[in-house]
Amino acid sequence: MKKSLYIAVIGCGRLGAILASDLSKQGHKVVVIDVDNSTFNHLSKEFSGFSIAGNTAEMSVLESAKLDQAEIAIAVTGKDNLNIMVSQLAKTVFEVPIVLTRILDPAREEIYQKLGLTTISTTKISAVAFLDTLQQKLNVLNVNS
C-alpha cells in the first residue's frame, strides 16, 4: 500500500479545492487553509481531511495546521506574494520537504525559482494549452481546405 502523506494545501479556491479533494481521495491526510470560510464549500463531499479558516500570513494559523509535520505544502492562493511568503515559511521555518508554489505572473517565476522555490505558473500552462489547441484546430483546417 502507498504511504499516506500529510499534505497542507494553502488556498481553497477552485484549484486548491480540487487538489485537496483529490489528494484526500488518494488516501493522504490533508489540511486545507483559507481566510474565507465559505471557500470550503468547494471541497468534494468525499473530502476527509480538515479545514482551517484563518489568515495564512499569520504564523499561528500555520502552526495550528501543524505545518511542521507536513511532508508537502502546496500554496495556491490567488495572490502571488502570499504564495511566496507561505512557501518560504514552509520551506525554511517549518522545514517542509516538498513545497510547490502557484505563480500567476510568469514574469516573477524566475525570481522565485532563484529563491529555491518550485513554482508552477498556471498562466503559462494555460497559454501553452490554448496555443496547442489553436495549432491543432489550424492543422485540421489546413488538412480540410
Image (tube, rainbow, N blue to C red):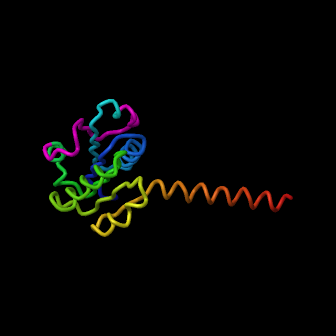
Taking the spot 37% from the left edge, 31% from the top edge, the residue there is 41
Say whether residue 21 is left or right of residue 134. left
Which portion, as a residue range, is magenta? 41-60
- Quarter holding the C terminus is bottom right
Question: At x 23% / y 44%, what residue is drawn?
Answer: 56
* Residue 75 drawn at (x, y percent): 31, 51
Report which quarter residue 14 is drawn in: top left
Pinpoint residue 134: horizontal percent, then vertical percent.
Answer: 67, 56
Q: Position of residue 47 (x, y in %)?
A: 35, 39
Closest to the observer, 38 or 130 = 130
Q: Quadrant of residue 71?
A: bottom left
**Horizontal relation, residue 13 to residue 126: left or right:** left
Q: Residue at x 33, y 30 (%)?
A: 38
Between 107 and 101, which is closer to the camera in this rendering?
107
- Seen in the picture, residue 85 relative to 78 is either above or below; the reply is below
Left or right placement of residue 31 versus residue 45 in this view:
left
The main secondary structure of the magenta stretch is loop
Asked where in the image residue 142 lies, by quadrant, the reply is bottom right
